[in-house]
Amino acid sequence: MTELTERQKKILMLVVREYIETAQPVGSKSLVKRYHLEVSSATVRNEMAALTEMGYLRQPHTSAGRTPSEEGYRYFVSQLMNQVELPSAVQHTISHQFFQARHDVEQWMHLAASILANRSQGVSLVTAPHAEQARYKHIELIATQGRQVLMVLVLIGGEVSQQVLTLAEPVPQEQLSRAAAQLNQVCVGFGADEIAALPARSNALEQDILTLVVQDMRRANNLVSGEIYTDGLTNVLSEPEFTDSDDARRALRLFEEESLLQDLLSRTIMNSSVGGLQVLIGGEETWEELQQCSMVLARYGVPGLATGTVGVLGPMRMPYARTIPTVRFMADLLSDLITETVFGE
């Protein structure tokens, strides 16, 4: 597209900011008055017409003001919005909330989703840290009722799998704990194939548990991401552009149909390095569900060991200047926490 003049850049930036705040088409007179521009409204109107011709603005009705197009938002995010950090007071508040939480990955996921939804007023998305290759950390076997036993498998990086087993006969907790301790001595750090290649255990219970562990770990290896946590679904439904519209519900299908979300993640942020951030605007001509939306996604974790995704979905006029630094800060914070979990124990 044609290179913009400095005046056109300024007018585009102001139109985007104004429309994000009001959700109403922006007119030349209101821009001149509100921002004390040193040019006439006719000059601004001409520049807005030029920006419309170039594809950065739209005019919903002949007599109406302008609204940003997908290209206008993309130019704003990539060229006009300075990279800002979260205010230090906000960083401190968020960090303190995690400091008060238990040292528990699942609680971190819920807390991250809640904070992102609250700060962005959009729908938050957080996937649990997922290993590129599942590696054994430890197992717990807990007697529950009769012949039933709860197996809790923890992988390096914090991923947890739980399932209830029904044994051939009841086994006392003391025997279950001994079996778990034996397996923890032998298997720590191993992948599924390495565990499968171990010599058969003389203890039948231990051998049966190992078979299930290998199945669980191979299933984990086939997943694109860990468990998905969301919050703030009502935020999008309350936005004015989604009132009496199917657009929001179409976007929320991403969260209801996990295969759609896994596909989006695998084709976007999962191809970037840890710390990488992507902004998807209007579905990027790929995802019909996101035609009226934007997503900000970032990858966190420990490269080569366990990574996850944090992000926010909202209308295209989402407050990018607040949402992008929040997502970036959350990704950095979770990376630090996961690093401590992997290497600090």
Image (cartoon, rainbow, N blue to C red):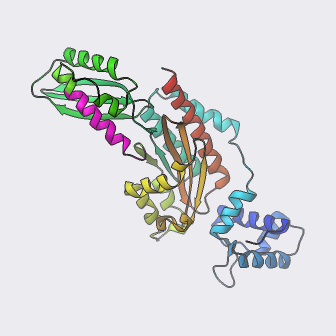
Quarter where residue 40 is shown: bottom right
Quarter where residue 155 is shown: top left
What secondary structure predominates along the stretch shown in magenta?
Answer: helix
The range drawn in magenta is 208-225
Residue located at (48% from left, 45% from top): 126
Q: Nearer the viewer, residue 224 or 325?
A: 224
Query: x, y (%) of residue 23?
Result: 63, 67
Left or right: 174, with 81 as reference point: left
Left or right: 230, with 294 as reference point: left
Residue located at (85% from left, 77% from top): 43
User: Is 223 part of what is drawn in magenta?
Assistant: yes
Q: Nearer the viewer, residue 69 or 224?
A: 224
User: Is 140 part of what is drawn in magenta?
Assistant: no
Q: Nearer the viewer, residue 58 or 93?
A: 58
Q: Residue furthest right?
A: 38
Query: x, y (%) of residue 330?
Result: 58, 40
